[in-house]
Image: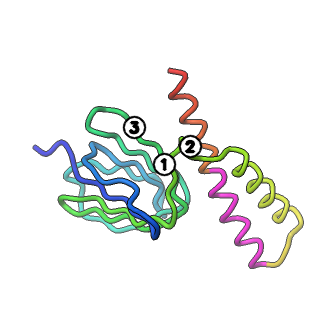
Amino acid sequence: MTTTIRCDIVSAEEEIFHGEVVMVVATGEMGELGIAPRHAPLITRLKPGKLILTLVDGSKLDMVVSGGILEVQPQVISILADTAIRAENIDALAVAKAREEAERILANRGEAMEIAEAQAKLAEAMAQLQALERLRKNLQH
């Protein structure tokens, strides 16, 4: 029985990850997805949120995606991300500032387009802050 599956994660700018994994956890349109080897074929949109890869050695690679598409095939999981950031590369100050700006726009009830954009930015900022929190917890253990 297969215990690993190849995972490829790319964005418009670069290849982010390529390798064998034991499990992928992502935030799909309909909720959290856990994908292991021999998973049924699937295509779904990704919402801004976490992306956690369990590597062959048991370690976890924690990332945040701002959206994209996830495709599961028998031999490979492909993730086409709008943007993807590894948790250790997140700038906490920049994320906090983006969150405050999005919350300010939402509180002032701007135009409909501005509100939709602010909601998307707030969701991305919250996902990045959650990734930082998971990284801090892992470093403490």
Dot 3: element: strand
Check disc 2 and give the amino acid type: Ala
Circles 2 and 1: CB distance less than 8 Å?
Answer: yes
Residue assigned mark 1: 63
Circles 3 and 1: CB distance less than 8 Å?
Answer: no
Dot 2: element: helix
Q: Which residues are magenta?
A: 112-126
> Please, is residue 6 above or below residue 10 in the view?
above
Going 39% across and 63% down the picture, which residue do you hit?
10
Q: Quadrant of the N terminus?
A: top left
How far apart in space, not on screen, are marks 3 and 2 (Cα)? 12 Å
Circles 3 and 2: CB distance less than 8 Å?
Answer: no
Residue assigned mark 2: 131
Dot 1: element: strand
- How many marks overall? 3
Residue 76 numbered tag: none
Going 27% across and 48% down the picture, which residue do you hit?
36
How far apart in space, not on screen, are marks 3 and 1 (Cα)? 10 Å
Check disc 3 and give the amino acid type: Lys
Farthest front residue? 14
Check disc 1 and give the amino acid type: Met
Please provide percent x and percent y for residue 139.
52, 26
Going 50% across and 28% down the picture, which residue do you hit?
138
Count neighbours of disc 1 (C-alpha within 10 A) and say few if under 14, some if 14 to 19, many if 20 or more: many
- Chain-order first, disc 2 or disc 1: 1
Residue assigned mark 3: 60
| Left-right relation of 110 to 37 | right
Please provide percent x and percent y for residue 132.
59, 40
